[in-house]
Image (tube, rainbow, N blue to C red):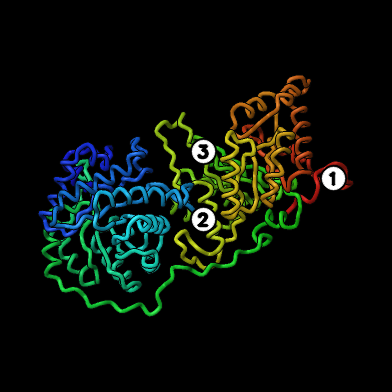
Amino acid sequence: MGTQLYAKGIFLNRCFDELNLTQPDLVAEVHRDYVRAGADVIETNTFGANRFKLANFGLADDARRIAREGAAIARRAADDAAWVAGSIGPLGVRIEPWGKTGVDEAEAAFREQAQGLVEGGVDLFILETFRDLNEMIAAIRAVRSVSALPVVAQMTTEEDGHSLDGTPAETFAPALERAGANVIGVNCSVGPAAMLETVEAMGRATTLPLAAQPNAGRPRDVDGRNLYLCSPEYMASYARRFVAAGVRLVGGCCGTTPDHVRQIAGAVRTAMPTAVRAVPAAPADGQAVVARPVERREKSALARAFAEKRFAIVMEAAAPRGLDLVPVVAQARRFRDLGAIAVSVPDYPKSGARASALALGVLIERQGPVETLLHYSCRDRSVIGIQSDLVGAHAMGLRNVLLTTGTPAPQARYPDATSVFDVDAIGLTNMVARLNHGLDIAGQPIGAPTLFHIGVAVNPFSPDPDAEWRRLEHKVEAGAEFLMTPPIFDLAAFDRVLPRLKSTGLPLLAGVAALEGVRHAEFLASEVVGVRLPDTLIDTLRRAGDERAAAMAVTVELSRELSSRVEGLQVTSVHGSSKTAEALLTALRPRSSGGDSLPGAMHG
């Protein structure tokens, strides 16, 4: 449908589903072309007719009407010559556990779309191009809640036969059967050859009828247009092979024209169906064995300190511009020698050519050697890329991670730079917790479990406190093991939220900024998100004769006050000097003769 509408002059930035309301005759013309070509089933022009995708065009509230009209158009065009399948695609957003959209919200959106399709008169449903098995199962449940019509459930896979999120056919086929699909299959992403191997693997895992709708090959850019170059004859030859492999619903996806369908129709009507497949001897249940996570104290020195109730100080070492990382490694070593248990490596979206936080963390761990706390954000990383990064980080010895959503890349220096957020911190925490159970994001075993010590950020002074606390609850539920705050300056305000933080039962690293003077304090108060400075503190620095000494005194006093409330401190210079942070750490070192130093040990 999309290929044909594009060929008829509809620009890609248009909402194709809206054409059901604005250009119904054009949509009907496409349907009739396929009916005349010999299609037994035509799909409605409703692949993206859910409120999440339609919201991008200001049409969220029209989802049900667009679906209903799409079905009605196809019904009229099919007349009595073909069945009408209600097309439902993925929502275009990540659902839990990887995204912020709840499964209940996803089901509600699919249900709304399915209701419109039923009202428009469809004969069956085709749920297609799903990459996430959880989302597909939510869609099946939603359809089943409004209709008993047949459901065709089609995942989309890579060349290796795994879904785009890594779930193998041997897992998703029986899972879709258990979820209530009548026909299961694959569509889109790959051409006929790769799809045939996937279909054969599915046939060994289920006895349900199979479906196959490959693309007409991989798209190629020809003079700025995506063209699919598999000939109708080639597609027809594979249609016969699909039928021989047990496929009962065969067709095409992107690039499949009426000419392709005409050849496919002729081929399958002369093909010999395979005999009924035998029931698999031991059908897979789709549930991998979950490994027992490693105990906290075995993961890292920081984790052991928390487990043994020893106070911990973590210092910050950020990547400088350029290639010379020797100074920052040396700084991390000095922090360690002064008593820091670990060095945190921030993942700030600073401009300029800088080493990644992951690369710097590995360098510090190996050349320090100093234990690190890697800040890892979701920004600019796909789910698959994140998983690869994490597996690689673990293989290189990193254990402590602070998982954050991240902030958008700065636009001032590179105005064309963009930011990508495939998942948020909650989904990232779920992912790392799953790795700690020996499973990848698709639920497949990876061998031994990872030993990540999982930290998450919390801003107790968020402008939207209800949302922040709700997100914190989800992070804890996902598998967080310790919390970290932005720099704390307002003790009275912190004391008001401390009971709620403590109620999580997790160790708390309170942020401390090594203040340098009035300008530094004003910058933190006005330009750093999540930081709250009392006016009285800034006034104190303004009245001081030696503002640098006063700033250090204030920071030391704040640190000692916080030490009686939390399990550790995370000291940052935040646009200040690492030398100031080093001086603060020196001032906080335990004294051999006792005194008013911080409690507990600060060594690994």
Pick the residue in front: 32 or 445.
32
Q: Secondary structure at mark 3?
A: loop
Pick the residue in front: 385 or 131.
131
Q: Secondary structure at mark 1?
A: loop
Residue 479 lies, with reference to residue 517, above or below; the image says below
**Mark with earlier residue (1, 3):** 3
Residue on which the image places disc 3:
407
- The residue located at (60%, 64%) in the rendering is 293
Using a 10 Å C-alpha cutoff, classify the residue at mark 2 as few (fewer than 14 neighbours), some (14 to 19) or many (20 or more).
many
- The residue located at (72%, 46%) in the rendering is 568
Q: Nearer the viewer, mark 1 or mark 3?
A: 3
The spot of residue 508 in percent (x, y) is 69, 47
Instruction: Check whether the beta carbons of the residues at disc 2 and disc 1 lie within 8 A of each other.
Output: no
The spot of residue 107 in percent (x, y) is 41, 52
- The residue located at (26%, 39%) in the rendering is 18
Residue 387 lies, with reference to residue 276, above or below; the image says above
Residue 468 lies, with reference to residue 534, above or below; the image says below
Q: Secondary structure at mark 2?
A: helix
Q: Residue 526 is drawn in which quadrant?
A: top right
- The dot on residue 591 is 1
- The residue located at (49%, 65%) in the rendering is 446
- The dot on residue 431 is 2
